[in-house]
Amino acid sequence: MGDVPFVLGRMLAHGLENAVFAAIADAAAVASAFDHGIGATVNLSLGGKLDTVNGTPLAVTGTVLALHTAGADRQAVILVDGIKVVVTSRRTAFTTVAQFEALGLDLTQHAIVGIKLGYLFPDLRRIAAYACLAFSPGAINPDLTQLPYRDLARPVYPLDAGMDWQPPG
């Protein structure tokens, strides 16, 4: 859904600084940032509104650093305890360097960049010194062994460890 704040919460809990996190979809938080303006301190309840099964809102206080409109999507950058958090009014995948530049963010100047995507798109991979995939709660779980299967004839590859299976042919 784009609004589960789990990874952002973990980044904040570990006291990360000089970091960017993109993005949390939260129209109300973006509206508040636009209402208050650049430089304002805002108290926000981020995310956990679209996907209430996998996430709950994360209470944060931060400073509005940037406001931007991209088509029908309004976007804000909020500095929260050393992390520049990108918040969008619509679910938005950040897949290019240009999307960050439009918000005044130079990803190469940050120690850590967290992006809510299933994988790293080529334009972002090009500038990444290191990339890793972190599994987190959400509507999509890429770890097939964790899905709640029903009516499945067992054993089945790759769910059952030690299964002896060879592709036909």
Image: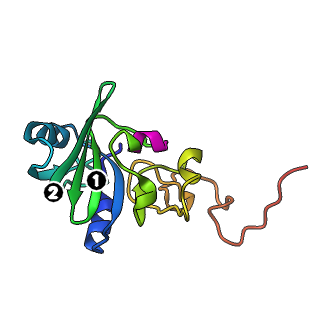
Instruction: Give whichever of 140, 59 is nearer the camera.
Output: 59
Describe the element under mark 2 as helix, strand or loop.
strand
Separation of residues labelled 2 and 1 (CA atoms): 9 Å
Label 1 near label 2: C-beta < 8 Å? yes
Whichever of callouts 2 and 1 sits on the residue coming sooner in the sequence is: 2
Q: Residues within 10 Å of mark 2 (few under 14, many from 20)?
A: many
Report the predominant secondary structure element of the magenta stretch: helix
Q: Residue at x 63, y 54 (%)?
A: 153
Left/right of residue 44 with respect to residue 143 in the rendered view: left
Q: Which residues are magenta?
A: 95-100
Picture coordinates of residue 3 (x, y %)? 30, 47
Q: Residue flagged by tag 2: what amino acid is it?
A: Gly
Which residue lies at the image location 15% right of the left edge and 54% below the top edge? 63
Q: Which residue is mark 2?
A: 62
Outermost residue to the right = 169
Above or below, 45 against 27 in this view is below
Residue 98 belongs to magenta span: yes
Q: Which residue is mark 1?
A: 85
